Image (cartoon, grey):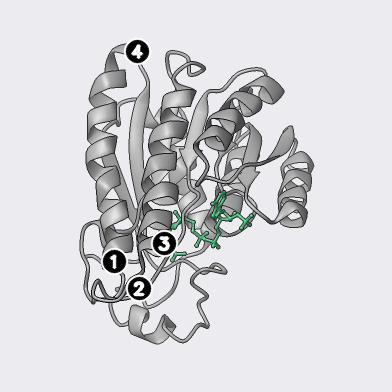
Amino acid sequence: MSDLKGRRALVTGGSRGIGAGIAAALAKAGADVAVTYEKSAGRAAEVVARIERLGGRGFAIQADSADPAAVRRSVDEAAEKLGGLDILVNNAGIGRAGPVAEIPLADIDALLNVNVRAVVLASQAALFHLPDGGRIVSVGSTLAERVPFGGLTAYAMTKSALISFNKGLARELGPRGITVNLIHPGSTDTDANPATGPDAEAQLGFNALGRFGKPEDVGAAVVFLAGPSGRQITGSAITVDGGANA
Ligand code: NDP
């Protein structure tokens, strides 16, 4: 598969989990890929090595998504290293649990800064680089559309915010031929939500297929949207959740 040969992509939070799966899927499809990370320099280096084994050029950029200047710099740095930017994947995200009655201000701020503000700022910075035919794909969550239990209310709110951002930005960028889409993963086996974790069984209770997804399941959806197959899809969302929200 080489639908993305010569395309240049940035995946935020690409050192582990879903972001690493997206980076590998893009590289398999022929793209050159830069990933950002916050702390995991070693894991990011492993992802770069994997991208290179798959035949692409890979770069790792340290950038805390909670820091506006770092977010902007990372997009410009990725475009500089890659020689341009065709695809931005806003994947970096954090979870903070706790009922609204108890969730600390610091957690609310962290959720908003990483899951929402960084998506706006990275997309804004990418506008200077993306050509006609460019792509923005953001990673939401099934919790953006359906919140089947309490305790993740503030997190769910940050992912719902991406729905309107996605639709509005698709309107703004349509005239430039840039598509803007969202992917809502359901339970996906990562460090943040291990398939063997204490909450896994409860999550599987909602899941039609009875199994957690893998990072590459989300990666496949990104490749579909980023390639020629996605040319007429914008302002839209794809749910990759084993039927949890069905
Ligand atoms: P992980 O915690 O496994 O990985 C998170 C990735 O994001 C890492 O690469 C991490 O970098 C990076 N990251 C976290 N915080 C920051 C930050 N402040 N600045 C820069 N990078 C950061 O998470 P997942 O792979 O599970 O989640 C990825 C996305 O998918 C998130 O947006 C999440 O909300 C969403 N999602 C996940 C689901 C799941 O079941 N796993 C379900 C629905 C949505 P580092 O390695 O340096 O820490």
Coordinates of residue 60 in the picture (x, y in percent): 71, 41
Which one is in front, 42 or 174? 42
Say which element carries label 1. loop
Question: What residue is pinned by disc 3?
Answer: 106
Any part of residue 109 in sight: yes
User: Is 174 located above or below residue 242 in the figure?
Assistant: above
The disc at residue 103 is none
Q: Of the residues under marks 2 and 3, which one precedes in the sequence?
A: 3
Badge 3, how many Cα within 10 Å: few under 14, some, many 20+?
few
Distance from disc 2 to disc 1, alpha carbons, whole Å, reads: 7 Å
Q: Where is residue 55 in the image (x, y as percent from the top left)?
A: 75, 36
Mark nearer the viewer, 2 or 3? 3
Quadrant hosting residue 175? top left
Identify which amino acid the numbered label 2 is placed on: Leu
Determine which quarter of the picture holds residue 179: top left
- Label 2 with label 1: CB-CB less than 8 Å: yes
Q: Residues within 10 Å of mark 4 (few under 14, many from 20)?
A: some
Contact between labelled residues 2 and 4, with CB atoms less than 8 Å apart:
no
Question: Real-space Cα distance between discs 1 and 3?
Answer: 33 Å
**Viewer-proximal residue among 23 and 114:** 114
Q: Name the residue under label 4.
A: 176
The amino acid at mark 3 is Ala
* Viewport quadrant of the N terminus: top right
- Whichever of labels 4 and 2 marks the residue nearer the N terminus, that label is 4
